[in-house]
Amino acid sequence: MKTMTCRDLGGPCTLEHHADSADAIIQAQDRHLRDAVKSGDTTHQEARDAMKGRWLHPRKSLDWYNGVKNAFASLPAA
């Protein structure tokens, strides 16, 4: 199990996501951003828009995705 924060993934806060894979961390971040914006938290809107763009254009977002995967791989297991 490894931990990355919302901020580590391009968001504005320090909420921690815990998962066994980078993909699961990314999915947790997507849910977090969606829920935060839905609840009226405008500080997460920019990151949410960026995340939505990544899902729509995954080939263009490979650098971000590979960066997250590499960062996740370099983290110590908890």
Image (cartoon, rainbow, N blue to C red):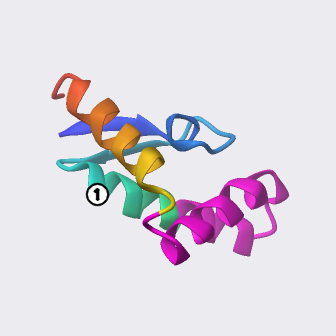
Structural crowding at the residue carrying mark 1, measured as other residues with C-alpha within 10 Å and reported as few (<14), some (14–19) or many (≥20)? some
Q: x%, y% of residue 41? A: 79, 60
Q: Nearer the viewer, residue 77 or 53?
A: 53
Residue 51 relative to residue 66: left or right: right
Residue range (magenta): 32-59
Q: What quarter of the picture does the C terminus occupy?
A: top left
Q: x%, y% of residue 27? A: 39, 64
Q: Amino acid at mark 1?
A: Asp
Badge 1 element = helix
Q: Nearer the viewer, residue 14 or 8?
A: 8
Q: Residue at x 65, y 60 (%)?
A: 50
Q: x%, y% of residue 38? A: 71, 75
Q: Residue at x 54, y 77 (%)?
A: 56
Q: Residue at x 76, y 56 (%)?
A: 46
Quarter of the image for residue 32 reads bottom right
Q: In the rendered structure, does residue 58 fall within the stretch colored magenta?
A: yes
Q: Which residue is mark 1?
A: 23
Quarter of the image for residue 35 reads bottom right
Q: Residue at x 17, y 40 (%)?
A: 1
Q: x%, y% of residue 8? A: 51, 34
Q: In the rendered structure, does residue 46 fall within the stretch colored magenta?
A: yes
